[in-house]
Image (cartoon, grey):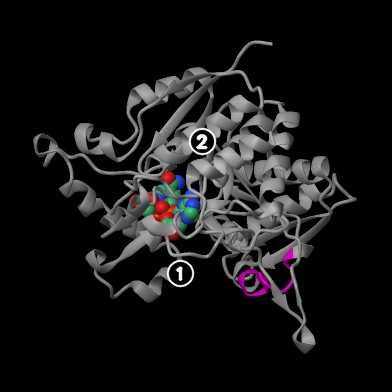
Amino acid sequence: MSIPTIVTMPGDGIGQTVLPEAIKVLDKVGFKADYVHADIGWEFWKTEGNPLPQRTLDLLEKHRVALFGAITSKPKDAAASELDPSLRGKGYVYYSPIVGLRQHFNLQLCIRPCRSFTGNPLNFIRRGAGGSTDEPKVDVVIFRQNTEGLYSGVEWTGPSDEVRRALETHPKMGSFSEIPSEDLAVSCRIFSRPACRYICQKAFEYADKHGYKSVTVCEKPNVIRETSGMMAQEARLVAKEYPHIALWFTNIDAQMMWLTKNPEDYGVILSGNMFGDIISDGFAGLTGGLGFANSANVGEDCAIFEPTHGSAPKYFDYEVPIVNPMAMILSACMMLDHLDEVEKADRIRMAIAEVIAEGKVRTYDMMKLQGRPDVVEHGAASTYQMTEAILAKL
Ligand code: NAI
Ligand code: MG
């Protein structure tokens, strides 16, 4: 079998801390690959006016599989003020490079597994009647549509007259008729049938392959009738091919309220872009939080694996890094699954499970400490010590 080339994009802040830790683990488990570095993030925004340089797109175009750390993003005006003086006033506008990557390579699926590890002190604990407590085992996989919906980027502050006229063909626009355009902000929630069908098919395929008993469409079709309604329609069609898998519907608001009531009842959950973003953070919070939240951005011919967390700049310049490398390492496991190296991925996940169950090595977040440089003196494992513990199990 030929050796794959993996594009590595550590990006900013702790992305640069955790990505090399994942490679140590991949090496240890005997995964053979060539790694090629690609530039992405704040540094390149400041110096080139582009956080996602063309040379990075070219590398991804060629190799099609990548590990990504995290990037720093800032609002438009703050971003403009940090641009190199020689680039200012030349029309450069900051866009999030990860959103750019998802759209450029049509990485339609964002898959976010939220599984509790036995013995993780961060697992959700529920109080029962009479004061008893229990710790439900959560095993939920979120399928989030990654390229459309409210994140499609079709939006205006101060829409042009042409846009305004088009909007006014809708009777409901009448309630905004007195508002001057400069006081109107419009963000479009666009769903397409092919993308809805695709995510429904992939979610059911995944549920079938991995033995989940239900697929839940988490949207809001009672109010957002057109877009959520299209997703629900497509889910009903696809569900017919999987009579052994239950199709459930929840509304995003109610689902968030129920999050802690019966999280163990859910299997695969599928949502549009924004609700998928929300619900996946919600479930991640039950299973260890950002230090554990792993994800894959997958298209037909390109896939990028990344922890859900950001660049956590406040922890970046610590002499001994303290952040949890688990989210990045679990994302690398998803990459192994994608490359049909499931056995290696399972070995890593097993090693992680053992470290957590033993409870001797815990990063500061697992000890519920405030992140500070002295947490290691208070018994927290550093980033490196956590990786070492996993390597030792392997
Ligand atoms: P963040 O995820 O970087 O950090 C939030 C907090 O979560 C941290 O202060 C820390 O307490 C905790 N945390 C994050 N990762 C951790 C880890 N591996 N181990 C232990 N604790 C961890 O989000 P924040 O502070 O809102 O954003 C910082 C920057 O990251 C911003 O510029 C933001 O735009 C960017 N960002 C980038 C993302 C990406 O690259 N995909 C995603 C989210 C934010
Ligand atoms: Mg998010």
Name the residue: 28% across, 54% down. Answer: 75
Rendered image quadrant of residue 50: top left
Instruction: Residue type at mark 1: give it.
Output: Pro
The crowding category of the residue bearing disc 1, from other C-alpha atoms within 10 Å (few below 14, some 14 to 19, many at least 20), is few
Instruction: Residue type at mark 2: give it.
Output: Glu
Image position of 125 with respect to 277: above or below: below
For residue 321, side relative to residue 277 (left or right): left
Question: Under tag 1, what secondary structure?
Answer: helix
Say if the magenta span includes residue 49: no
Q: Which residue is mark 1?
A: 171
Q: Which residue is mark 2?
A: 21
Residue 82 percent location from the top left of the image: 18, 46
Name the residue: 71% across, 50% down. Answer: 234
The crowding category of the residue bearing disc 2, from other C-alpha atoms within 10 Å (few below 14, some 14 to 19, many at least 20), is some
Q: Which residues are the magenta region?
A: 255-263
Q: Say if disc 1 is inside 8 Å of ligand 2.
A: no
Camera-side residue of 67 and 124: 124
Sequence order check: which comes first, mark 2 or mark 1? Answer: 2
